[in-house]
RNA sequence: GCGGGUGUAGCUCAGUGGUAGAGCACCACGUUGCCAACGUGGUUGUCGAGGGUUCAAAUCCCUUCACCCGCUCCA
């Protein structure tokens, strides 16, 4: 890991931001706890998001840049939902990955990433196969591999006394389809028909399943019927409650439903500190609008979400808004942009995803009406099973929306800004970390570690110190501390050690303001307010302390 | 899951079979009194966990867990 990231991780542990889960038992991979300061920081991140989305939103006027006024509302839905939700959403099928390992090189491949070219003889029996990486495309089948196939064909046809076909019959499928095809045709995949490692030609393991959704069981008796999943995203909670919210909430399209909550994914390799963990928190919002206006809203939310991070202190050079290419787009999406941050653990010019803003069309509501959808050309149609029935049946409920002004009935389109609360918290931690040089009392330059959190996000807003531990200063300081606490401001009191040391302690946890009671306080009823970033000191009356701090935090 | 590295005090680390250490941190007292490490004294460890070899293990062996790097995967 990069040096700077190591320092951030060490500071987070030392000062009580983030701990490994179950650490006394050796820890648990992919799970993290927030400590006394971390919990405050993350609460502030959530609060900034919820406040922006819901609390301070005024549905009577269009915010700057918005096409028109709109309503915003929240929900909190369960982590375990009806299994059909995940079947119709596509997660059930999509989150089962089959993988093979190369026994020699130890490389692992997703079965659908490996292409298999199968040569068929003129009696249409499969004779030999060669593998190559699917992403290389047609050229992946090198001249050597093609020659080998042709040679195997010629030998077979000669042995069987067949007339060789003019052009050798070679068809391509992926490793999964190949394994399935061979087992259905009851042909042992051995010898020349054995699919081998596309890169080394070594032996491969059989396809093995990796399930990315956490399974659990409902009810005390274990059984297939009771199998349920921990949600891999919070979004489905909003979709399945769309009708409830419309019917009860007096909201009219366009409007959004927001939710903050835990999600779970059984990541194969959780890594990069809390960036990819198995239990994580999402801040998601589903915005329902008329199809004709959807692209305008998509652009609006993309820009608005970008600005949210900037306003909370992320530097513009560390945050990028990247539109997905056509190939990257998920099956449901007609447009997606990622908000990505230059995390210190990434390479130069590489970014890690903080949030995806996706135009999901009518995919979600339609899936929950009709059943799991699949792309067919440029259409989404209900996926069918062998009997021609829907593979996974939808709810059958009418999730269309009736606009009583225009007398139009339609399935709303959805714009989804989906942010990771832990990732945002990590980005704010990384962005805040800073080392500068400040003179000590002898005038020598010393390295100062300072977390330059936006005051709204800082876990502690203000620290109160008596300059010295006597002459009545602790009493005055503790009464100021009490005032701040009573006003609901996150504050700490510290009388331990030299004043400079106390300032540095607060710098390291990112406290934006320090108040110091000194010898003159008794006469002038004022204290010194010291700013974390500029180190400027101003004297303010004790009676103004609460309002001054509030003004500096919330502007 | 695979390969390589790492794991000793709150932190950074020393300690290659023989009484667990240093610096910083932390606590107390004193001193100073608006930008950290001045004096005196003090606290701190199942040496990641479990098992084995040995008279004796932080040290050698086995198993296991976690972290880091690479592959793989991914929001």
Image (spheres, grey):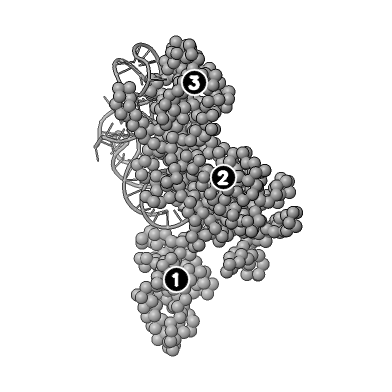
- Output the chain of dot 1: A
Between the C-alphas of marks 2 and 1, the distance is 41 Å
For residue A30, say whether it is visible.
Answer: no
Tell me if label 2 and label 1 are in contact, CB under 8 Å.
no
Residue A112 horizontal/vertical position (percent): 48, 64
Residue A376 horizontal/vertical position (percent): 59, 68
Residue B51 horizontal/vertical position (percent): 39, 40
A303 lies above or below A470: below
Q: Residue at image x 46%, y 61%? A: A110
Residue A16 is drawn in which quadrant? top left
Which tag is nearer the camera, tag 2 or tag 1? 2
Residue A118 horizontal/vertical position (percent): 45, 75
Residues B5 and A296: in front is A296
Q: Earlier in the sequence, mark 1 or mark 3?
A: 1
Residue A540: give its label. 3
Q: Residue at image x 42%, y 46%? A: A317
Residue A291 is drawn in which quadrant? bottom right
Quadrant the N terminus of chain A occupies: top left
A493 lies above or below A99: above
Q: Which residue is mark 2?
A: A283
Residues A105 and A224: in front is A105
A52 lies above or below A324: above
């Amino acid at each position: 890991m990069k040096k700077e990231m190591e320092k951030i991780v060490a500071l987070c542990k030392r000062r009580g931001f983030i701990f490994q889960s179950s650490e006394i038992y050796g820890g648990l991979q992919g799970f993290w706890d927030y400590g006394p300061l971390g919990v405050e920081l993350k609460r502030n991140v959530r609060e900034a998001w919820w406040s922006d989305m819901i609390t301070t939103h005024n549905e009577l006027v269009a915010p700057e840049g918005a096409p028109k006024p709109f309503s915003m509302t929240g929900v909190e839905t369960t982590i375990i939902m009806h299994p059909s939700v995940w079947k119709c959403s596509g997660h059930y099928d999509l989150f089962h990955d089959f993988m093979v390992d190369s026994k020699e090189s130890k490389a692992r491949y997703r079965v659908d990433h490996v292409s298999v070219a199968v040569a068929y003889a003129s009696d249409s029996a499969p004779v030999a196969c060669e593998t190559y990486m699917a992403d290389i495309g047609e050229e992946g089948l090198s001249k050597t591999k093609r020659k080998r196939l042709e040679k195997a064909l010629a030998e077979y046809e000669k042995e069987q006394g067949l007339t060789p076909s003019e052009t050798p019959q070679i068809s391509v499928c992926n490793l999964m389809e190949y394994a399935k095809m061979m087992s259905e045709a009851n042909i042992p995949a051995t010898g020349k028909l054995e699919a081998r490692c596309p890169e080394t030609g070594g032996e491969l393991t059989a396809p093995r399943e990796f399930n990315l959704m956490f399974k659990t069981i409902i009810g005390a008796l274990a059984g297939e019927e009771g199998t349920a999943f921990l949600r891999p995203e919070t979004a489905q909670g909003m979709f399945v409650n769309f009708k409830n919210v419309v019917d009860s909430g007096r909201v009219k399209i366009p409007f959004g439903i927001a939710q903050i909550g835990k999600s779970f994914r059984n990541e194969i390799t959780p890594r990069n500190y809390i960036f990819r963990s198995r239990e994580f928190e999402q801040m998601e919002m589903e915005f329902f609008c008329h199809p004709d206006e959807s692209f305008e809203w998509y652009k609006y939310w993309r820009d608005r979400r970008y600005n949210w991070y900037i306003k909370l202190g992320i530097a513009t050079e560390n945050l990028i808004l990247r539109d997905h290419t056509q190939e990257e787009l998920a099956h449901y999406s007609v447009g997606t942009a990622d908000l990505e941050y230059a995390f210190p653990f990434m390479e130069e010019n590489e970014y890690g995803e903080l949030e995806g803003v996706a135009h999901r069309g009518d995919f979600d509501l339609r899936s929950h009406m009709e059943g799991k959808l699949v792309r067919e050309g440029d259409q989404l149609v209900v996926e069918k099973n062998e009997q021609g029935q829907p593979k996974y049946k939808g709810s059958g409920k009418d999730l269309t929306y009736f606009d009583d002004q225009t007398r139009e009935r339609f399935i709303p389109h959805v714009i989804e800004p989906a942010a990771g609360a832990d990732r945002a918290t990590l980005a704010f931690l990384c962005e805040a970390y800073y080392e500068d040089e400040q003179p000590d009392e002898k005038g020598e330059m010393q390295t100062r570690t300072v977390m330059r959190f936006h005051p709204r996000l800082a876990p502690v807003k203000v620290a109160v110190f008596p300059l010295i531990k006597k002459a009545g200063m602790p009493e005055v300081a503790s009464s100021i501390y009490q005032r701040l606490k009573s006003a609901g401001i996150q504050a700490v009191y510290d009388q331990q050690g030299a004043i400079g040391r106390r300032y540095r302690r607060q710098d390291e946890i990112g406290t934006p303001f320090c108040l110091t009671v000194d010898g003159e306080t008794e006469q002038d009823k004022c204290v010194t307010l010291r700013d974390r970033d500029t180190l400027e000191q101003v004297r303010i009356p004790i009676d103004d302390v609460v309002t001054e701090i509030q003004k500096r935090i919330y502007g």
